[in-house]
């Protein structure tokens, strides 16, 4: 189930990799669109949106934050991968830019949102 604070890969056009992980920030129920923030400061766009984001846990991955929500990395959970494309074909994690050892510098706005969502969930 999608909720605010869920880590996702936004759309089928986003490669499932650490740099393109986003956090859901709001849902526009009139248009059926989720709004999010990319975690990595390395992305060109800051605030993606779309109709069908895929939760990160479906790729058997999770976000691990560094101190003070300034950096993050994506690490495997060893759970089964259940991510699929719209046509039902399997969708694999494709981290081409460093894997689980790569720490990404976090975008300040995304880090602030994630720290708030984490505080609410606790």
Image (cartoon, rainbow, N blue to C red):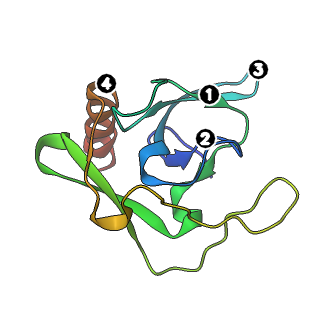
Query: Do the numbered discs 4 and 3 sit on residues whose CB atoms are within 8 Å?
Result: no
Q: Is residue 70 above or below residue 89?
A: above
Q: CA distance from mark 1 to mark 2?
A: 7 Å
Q: CA distance from mark 4 to mark 3?
A: 24 Å
Query: Do the numbered discs 1 and 2 sit on residues whose CB atoms are within 8 Å?
Result: yes
Q: CA distance from mark 2 to mark 4?
A: 17 Å
Q: Is residue 61 above or below residue 46?
A: below
Residue positioned most to the right = 87
Q: Which mark is residue 109?
A: 4
Q: Earlier in the sequence, mark 3 or mark 1?
A: 3
Q: Earlier in the sequence, mark 3 or mark 2?
A: 2
Mark 3 against mark 1, which lies toward the viewer?
Answer: 1
Q: CA distance from mark 1 to mark 4?
A: 16 Å
The residue beneath circle 3 is: 31
Instruction: Locate residue 75, reporting x and y percent.
Output: 36, 67
Query: Do the numbered discs 3 and 1 sit on residues whose CB atoms are within 8 Å?
Result: no
Q: Earlier in the sequence, mark 1 or mark 4?
A: 1
Mark 3 against mark 2, which lies toward the viewer?
Answer: 2
Q: Earlier in the sequence, mark 4 or mark 3?
A: 3
Instruction: Locate residue 73, reporting x and y percent.
Output: 31, 56
The residue beneath circle 2 is: 10
Instruction: Locate residue 51, reporting x and y percent.
Output: 73, 34
Residue positioned most to the left = 67
The residue beneath circle 1 is: 49
Q: Residue at x 56, y 54 (%)?
A: 16
Q: Residues within 10 Å of mark 1 (few under 14, many from 20)?
A: some
Secondary structure of residue under mark 2: loop
């Amino acid at each position: 189930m999608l909720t605010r604070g869920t880590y996702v890969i936004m759309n089928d056009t986003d490669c499932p990799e650490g740099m393109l992980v986003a956090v859901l920030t709001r849902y526009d129920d009139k248009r059926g669109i989720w709004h999010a923030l990319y975690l990595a400061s390395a992305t060109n766009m800051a605030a993606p949106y779309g109709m069908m984001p895929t939760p990160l846990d479906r790729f058997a991955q999770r976000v691990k934050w560094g101190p003070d929500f300034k950096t993050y990395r994506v690490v495997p959970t060893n759970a089964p991968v259940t991510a699929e494309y719209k046509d039902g074909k399997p969708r694999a994690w494709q981290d081409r830019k460093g894997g689980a050892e790569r720490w990404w510098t976090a975008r300040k706005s995304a880090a602030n949102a994630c720290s708030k969502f984490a505080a609410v969930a606790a």
